[in-house]
Amino acid sequence: MPELPSDKYSVSVTLVSLQEEQRNVLNVPGEVIARGSQLYIRYEEPGQGPQGEDASIRTTIKIAGSELKIIRHGGVQSEQTFQSGQRLPGFYRSPYTQFNLSTETRELDILRDGRSLKVSWEYDLYVYEELSGQFAISLHIQEEPKS
């Protein structure tokens, strides 16, 4: 089977996470790799260790059809999968702790417009089968103009 051609380009990534009244915004450069109908968005999260150590985290977001998967490597390793109406397993590992988790996605909207992308999703996070938090996330990807 021939390898699907991939299209790679630089983007700016804006991720807004809302948990209860706490709002976090991450704005970082990244890249998108499009392979067929699948999109891979990669970016680095700056390290924010408890002792101020700089263990940055490489994050890959994979979008395939109506499923979104977030894979993180570096200071933290984790995997979370989101699909509307589904409760799916994942995990979280850091030097200090590790646990299995699952996400129950209430809503997932993926809007692709050329090389721009808007994704929003809401989910309940379960750790050891206990509800740990409710989140609303929005992700905005915009192609960086070529200099």
Image (cartoon, rainbow, N blue to C red):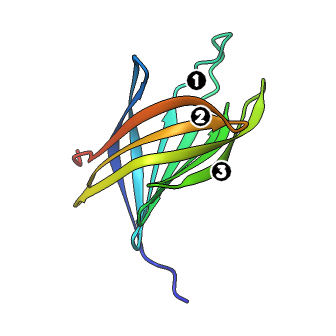
Instruction: Please tell me whether mark 3 sits on a helix, a strand or a loop.
Output: strand
How packed is label 1: few (under 14 Cα within 10 Å), some, or many (20 or more)?
some
Residue 89: mark in rendering: 3
The three-letter code of the residue at mark 1 reads Gly
- Location of the N terminus by quadrant is bottom right
Would you say the residues marked 1 and 3 are in contact, meaning their CB atoms lie under 8 Å apart? no
The three-letter code of the residue at mark 3 reads Pro
Instruction: Please tell me whether mark 1 sits on a helix, a strand or a loop.
Output: loop
Instruction: Please tell me whether mark 2 sits on a helix, a strand or a loop.
Output: strand
| Residue at far top of view | 51
Residue plotted at (60% across, 53% down): 88
Residue 57: mark in rendering: 2
Q: Is residue 115 visible?
A: no
Asked whether, in this view, residue 69 is left or right of residue 38, the answer is right
Viewer-nearest of discs 1 and 3: 3
Measured Cα–Cα span from mark 3 to mark 2: 21 Å
Residue plotted at (39% across, 36% down): 137
Q: Is residue 32 above or below residue 122?
A: below
User: For this rendering, which residue is in front, 30 or 23?
Assistant: 23
How packed is label 2: few (under 14 Cα within 10 Å), some, or many (20 or more)?
some
Residue 47: mark in rendering: 1
- Quadrant in the picture for residue 131: top right
- Location of the C terminus by quadrant is top left
